[in-house]
C-alpha cells in the first residue's frame, strides 16, 4: 500500500513537472528551436535583459494590468465584503453572493464573450470605433478578480470577534477608528491573500483578455497565443523560467503569511 | 449613549445597527452597481445577441440616366464575401445599368442588428456544431474521469503524510498551476511532436514513430494535465479534515483496508469529489486552446467553434452565433453543476483556490 502511494505520488509529480522541465531545458538552447537542442547558451536570457522587444513589452503590460486590477479589485472587494458582512441575511445579501458566484462558475470563454458583447454593444451606442481597449481589459480583469477578493476577506470577517469591535466603540472609539484599529488587523491576511490571488489570476489570464483587449494593449498570454508554432522561440521559455522562480518565491511568501496567521490564532 | 450602555448590551447594539444601516447601504452600493453592470448585464447581452440577427450588407445608391437606384446587398462571408467594388458592380448589374454610367452617391458597408431570430440557435444545432458538442462532452468527461482516478489516491496519500510534507507538497501542486497554461501546453506539444522527446526516446530503443499530436488522446492529456490540480485540491481538503480517530476506530473495530475505504473514506470525501468534478469538467468542456494546440487545429470542440465564429465571421452574424453557442454552453454547464451539486451536501465541499 505504501509503495503504491509512493509510485502514484512520484508519477503525478513527474507528470506535472515534465513540461516545466522541458521548458527550462530548452530555455538554455543555443538555437532558435524549442524542440531541437543545439547546445547550451544563455543567449535568450541575455536577450531578455537587454530589452527583449515585443515580448518584454507584453510582459510589462501584463505586470501593469495585474497590479492595477489587483489593487482596484482589492479595494472594491474589501469594501463589498465588509458591506456583505454587516448586511442582514436576506434577499439582497443572497442576491449579491449569487451574482458574485457567476464569474467563478462560468467558464472563462463565456465570461469573456459576455463582457465583449457588452463592450461591443456600448461601442455601438456611443459610436466608438474600437469596442475594446485597455480600459475594457482593465474592467474585465477587475470584474473577475473581485469575487476572489470577497471569498478571501468575507471568511476572515466572519471568523473575527464582533465583541472586540463593540468593545472598542464602548471604550470611546469612533466607528472608523474602531474599524482600522480592531477589525482591520483581523482581516489583513485575507486581504493580502485575496490581492495576491487577484494578481496571479490577472497575470495569467488568457481567455478573458483575448476577448476584451484591443490592439492598443497586448498582454503576455495574448501575445504568446498570437505566435504560430514556427515563431515560438526559446525566449518565451526563458521568460517563463524566470517567472517560475518568481512565482515560487511568491508562493513561499504567501504560505508564510498563512502560517503566521495560523500560529497567531493558535497563540490565542 | 450612557443611557443605552446602562440599559444593557442589546439595545445599544440595536441602536448601532439602526445608525449604521445607511452606512451598510453605502458599503454595498459600489459592488452592487459594478456587478450589475459588468456581470448581470453581460449575461443578458449574451441572451440578447443569441436571439437577434446581425447581417452586414452594402447600402448602395446610384443614379444613372436621370434615375435614382438604391439597393442593399448582403456582404456574404468567407470566400463569398464581396468587396465594395464587386458590390457596386452587382448593384449596377441588377438594374441593367452599365457600371461606367452609374454615378454612386452612397456605397457603404453597414451592420444591421436587432430583429428577433431563432436562426442562431438553429446553427448551434447544425451537424458540425453538434459533432463539436458531442466531442467536447466526451473528451471532458474522459478527462474528468481520468483526473479523478489519478487524484483520488494521490490526495489520500497526501492527506496522510506529515504536516510539513503536506505544506511543501501543496506548494508543489500549485506551482505549475500558476505558470501560464499556453506555455505549458506548448511544452507538451514539443514533447508529443513527431520529432519530439517521446519519439526520440522511442527511436533510441528502435521503436517506430508514434503520431500523438492530433489524436483525441493528446487533447484529453492536455485537459488532464492542465486541470488535475483542481481535482486534487478539493479532494485533499476534505480528506485532510477526516478525523484520524475515526480511521483508528475503524481499525479497532476490525475493518480491513477495503472496508475502511468504502464505508468511511469514500462517503466522507464526496463533497470534495463533487467540487473536483465540477472544477475539471467546466474548464475542459469550454477550452479552445488545448484542443487547438494538442491537435494542431484538427479537432474542433465547442470552444473552438465559438472562437472561430466570433473571430472569422464577426460582421456577418458570427458574433450572434458565437453568443448562441456561449448561451447553450452556459446552460449545459449550469445543468451539469446543478445535478452534481445535488449529490453533495448542502455545504458543497471546500472551494479551494
Image (cartoon, rainbow, N blue to C red):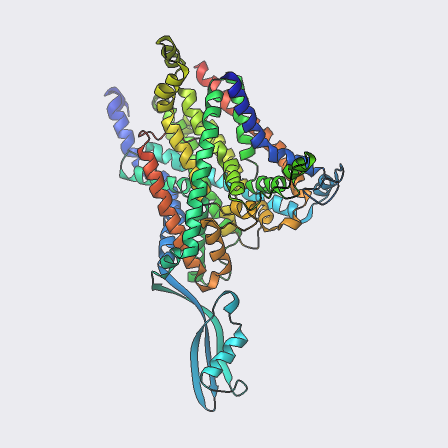
How many numbered circles are shown?
Answer: 0
Q: Quadrant of the N terminus of chain B?
A: top left
Q: Is residue A126 left or right of residue B16?
A: right
Residue A254, given in percent of the width and then of the height, sits at 53, 27
Of all residues shown, which one is farthest toward the top? B252
| B293, above or below A160, in the image | below
Q: Residue at coordinates 51% horizontally, 85% vertically from top-left? A: B103
The answer to whether residue B27 of the structure is visible from this angle is: yes
Which one is nearer the viewer's eye here, B330 or B105? B330
Q: Is residue A98 left or right of residue A44?
A: left
Q: Residue at coordinates 57% horizontally, 37% vertically from top-left? A: B179
Of all residues shown, which one is farthest toward the bottom? B65
Q: Residue at coordinates 54% horizontally, 45% vertically from top-left? A: B215
| Residue B156 falls in image quadrant | top left
| B273, above or below A263, in the image | below
Residue B88, given in percent of the width and then of the height, sits at 51, 78
Q: Is residue B25 left or right of residue A106?
A: left
| Residue A37 falls in image quadrant | top right
The answer to whether residue A174 of the structure is visible from this angle is: no
Residue B245, given in percent of the width and then of the height, sits at 38, 12
Q: Residue at coordinates 41% horizontally, 58% vertically from top-left? A: B320
Amino acid at each position: 500500500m505504501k509503495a503504491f502511494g509512493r509510485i502514484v505520488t512520484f508519477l503525478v509529480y513527474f507528470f506535472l513537472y515534465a513540461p516545466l522541465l522541458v521548458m527550462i531545458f530548452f530555455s538554455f538552447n543555443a538555437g532558435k528551436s524549442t524542440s531541437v537542442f543545439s547546445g547550451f547558451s544563455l543567449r535568450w536570457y541575455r536577450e531578455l535583459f537587454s530589452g527583449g522587444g515585443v515580448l518584454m513589452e507584453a510582459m510589462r503590460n501584463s505586470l501593469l494590468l495585474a497590479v492595477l486590477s489587483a489593487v482596484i479589485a482589492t479595494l472594491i472587494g474589501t469594501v463589498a465584503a465588509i458591506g456583505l458582512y454587516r448586511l442582514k441575511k436576506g434577499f439582497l445579501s443572497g442576491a449579491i453572493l449569487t451574482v458574485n458566484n457567476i464569474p467563478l462558475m462560468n467558464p472563462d470563454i463565456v465570461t469573456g464573450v459576455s463582457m465583449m458583447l457588452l463592450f461591443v454593444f456600448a461601442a455601438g451606442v456611443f459610436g466608438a470605433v474600437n469596442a475594446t481597449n485597455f480600459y475594457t481589459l482593465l474592467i474585465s480583469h477587475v470584474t473577475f478578480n473581485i469575487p476572489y477578493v470577497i471569498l478571501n476577506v468575507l471568511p476572515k470577517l466572519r471568523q473575527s470577534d464582533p465583541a472586540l469591535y463593540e468593545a472598542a466603540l464602548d471604550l470611546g472609539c469612533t466607528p472608523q477608528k474602531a474599524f482600522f484599529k480592531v477589525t482591520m488587523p483581523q482581516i489583513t491576511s485575507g486581504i493580502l491573500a485575496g490581492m495576491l490571488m487577484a494578481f496571479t489570476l490577472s497575470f495569467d489570464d488568457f481567455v478573458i483578455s483575448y476577448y476584451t483587449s484591443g490592439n492598443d494593449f497586448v498582454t503576455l498570454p495574448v501575445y504568446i497565443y498570437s505566435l504560430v508554432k514556427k515563431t515560438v522561440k526559446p525566449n518565451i521559455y526563458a521568460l517563463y523560467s524566470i517567472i517560475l522562480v518568481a512565482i515560487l518565491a511568491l508562493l513561499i511568501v504567501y504560505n508564510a503569511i498563512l502560517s503566521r496567521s495560523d500560529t497567531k490564532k493558535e497563540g490565542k | 449613549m450612557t443611557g443605552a450602555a446602562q440599559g444593557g448590551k442589546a439595545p445599544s447594539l440595536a441602536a448601532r445597527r439602526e445608525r449604521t444601516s445607511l452606512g451598510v447601504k453605502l458599503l454595498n452600493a459600489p459592488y452592487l452597481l459594478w456587478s450589475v453592470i459588468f456581470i448581470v448585464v453581460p449575461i443578458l447581452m449574451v441572451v440578447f445577441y443569441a436571439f437577434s440577427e446581425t447581417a452586414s450588407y452594402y447600402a448602395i445608391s446610384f443614379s444613372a440616366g436621370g434615375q435614382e437606384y438604391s439597393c442593399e446587398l448582403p456582404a456574404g462571408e468567407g470566400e463569398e464575401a464581396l468587396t465594395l467594388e464587386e458590390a457596386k458592380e452587382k448593384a449596377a448589374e441588377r438594374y441593367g445599368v452599365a457600371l461606367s454610367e452609374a454615378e454612386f452617391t452612397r456605397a457603404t458597408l453597414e451592420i444591421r442588428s436587432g430583429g428577433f431570430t431563432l436562426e442562431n440557435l438553429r446553427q448551434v444545432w447544425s451537424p458540425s456544431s453538434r459533432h463539436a458538442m458531442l466531442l467536447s462532452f466526451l473528451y471532458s468527461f474522459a478527462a474528468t474521469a481520468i483526473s479523478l482516478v489519478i487524484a483520488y489516491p494521490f490526495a489520500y496519500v497526501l492527506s496522510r503524510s506529515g504536516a510539513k510534507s503536506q505544506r511543501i507538497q501543496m506548494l508543489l501542486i500549485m506551482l505549475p498551476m500558476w505558470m501560464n497554461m499556453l506555455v505549458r501546453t506548448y511544452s507538451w506539444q514539443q514533447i508529443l511532436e513527431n520529432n519530439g522527446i517521446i519519439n526520440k526516446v522511442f527511436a533510441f530503443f528502435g521503436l517506430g514513430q508514434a503520431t500523438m499530436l492530433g489524436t483525441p488522446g493528446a487533447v484529453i492529456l492536455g485537459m488532464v494535465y492542465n486541470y488535475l490540480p483542481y481535482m486534487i485540491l478539493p479532494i485533499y481538503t476534505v480528506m485532510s479534515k477526516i478525523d484520524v480517530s475515526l480511521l483508528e476506530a475503524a481499525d479497532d473495530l476490525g475493518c480491513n483496508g477495503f472496508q475502511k475505504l468504502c464505508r468511511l473514506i469514500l462517503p466522507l470525501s464526496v463533497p470534495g469529489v463533487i467540487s473536483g468534478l465540477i472544477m475539471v469538467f467546466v474548464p475542459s468542456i469550454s477550452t479552445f486552446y488545448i484542443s487547438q494546440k494538442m491537435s494542431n487545429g484538427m479537432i474542433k470542440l465547442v470552444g473552438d467553434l465559438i472562437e472561430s465564429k466570433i473571430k472569422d465571421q464577426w460582421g456577418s452574424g458570427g458574433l450572434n452565433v458565437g453568443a448562441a453557442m456561449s448561451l447553450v454552453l452556459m446552460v449545459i454547464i449550469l445543468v451539469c453543476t446543478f445535478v452534481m451539486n445535488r449529490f453533495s451536501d448542502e455545504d458543497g465541499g471546500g472551494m479551494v483556490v
